Amino acid sequence: MTEFLATDVGWLRLDLLARLVLAAVLGGIVGVEREWSGKPAGFRTNLLICVGAALLTELSISVARAADPFAMADPGRIAAQIVSGIGFLGAGTIIQSRAGVVGLTTAATLWVVAAIGMAVGAAAYVEAVGATILVVVALLVLGQLEPYLSRQRDVVLRVTMDRDPNTMEQVDTLLGDRLKVQVMEAERTDKEVSMTYHISGHMDLTLRLVDRLLEIDGVRIVVRR
């Protein structure tokens, strides 16, 4: 009876189950931060990626061990596909818009979560836990400091100008000079046009933007929100 129970427990691979639970915890920790930040790849996505990467890495190593010793089986053959596979998943989170590229941090997070799962599957527990701590710190702390470190600035301007094609062309030319511009709102009357822009660019370009707009003939009012 004791031998049967020992065999049964061995069949359950408690060590593998423990690894998968650890992968779920580590992926879930990163996922909670993503969920709180309102990102599309949140708690469940990061948890599943981490668990899946851990399981595939374990299978990759186990299959190589079970193969014929003379077959020169590669223990990283299956695990290597995780790297390329997560690339397709991460690419789906990146969105290109007129205001710039959105989703790069989410894609990078998915990539590093998969790496954490691979570390757990390869029994590199210290490395996996350490990487999780670094990722959470980077997302929480550095995310708060990033606006102060970057020289990129976002501004919202409401420009009221004469309904004159030459004036509107000069405004478009000025705003299109090394700036990323998105029109948020537009209003027109018989004599005037009011446009609300979301503008992203280098701090040196955005600081004097209001003065440069007011220098254009036909621009009546510029309000920075």
Image: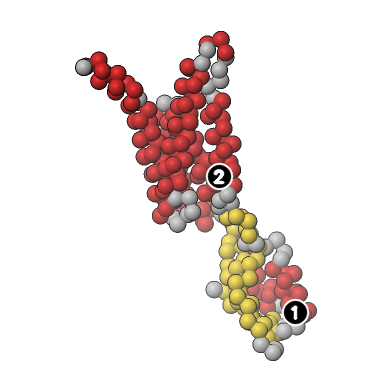
Task: Tell me the quarter of the image containing the C terminus.
Answer: bottom right
Q: Left or right: where does residue 167 sit relative to residue 119?
A: right
Q: Residue furthest right?
A: 166
Residue type at mark 1? Thr
Considering depth in this image, is 212 or 198 the residue closer to the camera? Answer: 198
| Label 1 Cα neighbours within 10 Å, binned few <14 / some 14-19 / many ≥20 | some
Taking the spot 56% from the left edge, 25% from the top edge, the residue there is: 77
Q: Nearer the viewer, mark 2 or mark 1?
A: 2
Q: Earlier in the sequence, mark 2 or mark 1?
A: 2
Task: Read off the residue under disc 2.
Answer: 89
Q: Residue furthest left?
A: 1
Q: Quadrant of residue 197?
A: bottom right
Does 136 sit above or below residue 96? above
Residue type at mark 2? Leu
Mark 2: which secondary structure?
helix
| Label 2 Cα neighbours within 10 Å, binned few <14 / some 14-19 / many ≥20 | some
Mark 1: which secondary structure?
helix
Q: Quadrant of residue 193?
A: bottom right
Give how far across and how far down residue 221 sits, in percent: 63, 82
Task: Read off the residue under disc 1.
Answer: 167
Give how far across and how far down residue 9 sits, in percent: 29, 23
The answer, for residue 136, to whether it is visible in the render is no
Give how far across and how far down residue 102 sits, in percent: 58, 55
Task: Tell me the quarter of the image containing the N terminus.
Answer: top left
